[in-house]
Image: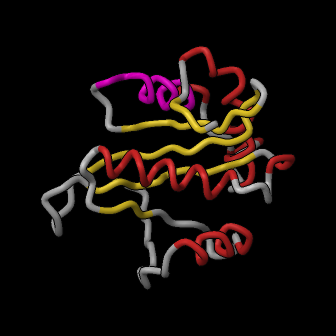
Amino acid sequence: MIRPARPADFAAWLPLWQGYNAFYGRSGATALADDITAATWARFHDPAEPMHCLVAERDGALLGLVHFLYHRSTTALAPTCYLADLFTSAAARGQGLGRALIEAVCAAAHSAGASRVYWQTHEGNATAQALYDKLVARSGFIVYRIAV
């Protein structure tokens, strides 16, 4: 079952969030500060925030998460949906949860009147790319980032 995260889900969501961050090298000395995690979780439950969290649940256990947010665009009047984070537990991989979470974000975005959903992944994440390539064509854009 894919559903919005509830405040009571924090203890079950946290290991998934930590797993996601560890996958991208944000653990140990480079781990996210606890206040960032706390603020992120709070934003999901603040109706004034454009950030959202869906979780995949089976038999009372959380097996995956997806975080997304809405923002304005210079190329469309409707909001755009950015799928920020997608993660499933190792035990749940290969069972269609990633696809189901992406499809749930697309359904939520459609309901919100968004014009598109987009996301990025690391160039070395071949497993994720294999799924994404089945769902949609690559945009051709390369992401650059600079800290300010």
Where is residue 146? Give x, y as percent: 42, 64
Instruction: State whether the magenta stretch is mostly helix, strand or loop.
Output: helix
Question: Is 90 situated above or below 130?
Answer: above
- Residue toward you, 130 or 15: 130
Q: Which residue lies at the image location 68% right of the left edge and 51% below the top edge?
A: 97
Task: Classify the position of the C terminus by image quarter.
Answer: bottom left
- Residue toward you, 102 or 24: 102
Task: Classify the position of the N terminus by image quarter.
Answer: top right
What residue occupies the far left of the structure in this picture? 77
Question: Is 44 situated above or below 107?
Answer: above
Question: Is 58 situated above or below 19?
Answer: above
Question: Is 125 situated above or below 35?
Answer: below
Where is residue 121? Give x, y as percent: 58, 66
Q: Magenta includes 14?
A: no
In the picture provided, is 143 more to the left or to the right than 98? left
What residue occupies the far bottom of the structure in this picture? 140
What color scheme is it?
secondary structure
Q: Magenta includes 39?
A: yes
Where is residue 24? Give x, y as percent: 68, 56
In the picture provided, is 4 more to the left or to the right than 55? left
- Residue toward you, 37 or 102: 102
What residue occupies the far top of the structure in this picture? 8
Q: Residue 27 falls in which quadrant of the image? A: top right
- Residue toward you, 53 or 74: 53
Q: Which residue lies at the image location 55% right of the left edge and 28% below the top edge?
A: 5
Range of magenta residues: 37-47
Q: Which residue lies at the image location 74% right of the left edge and 43% below the top edge?
A: 19
Q: Residue 127 falls in which quadrant of the image? A: bottom right
Q: Which residue lies at the image location 50% right of the left edge and 48% below the top edge?
A: 104
Where is residue 125? Give x, y as percent: 70, 70
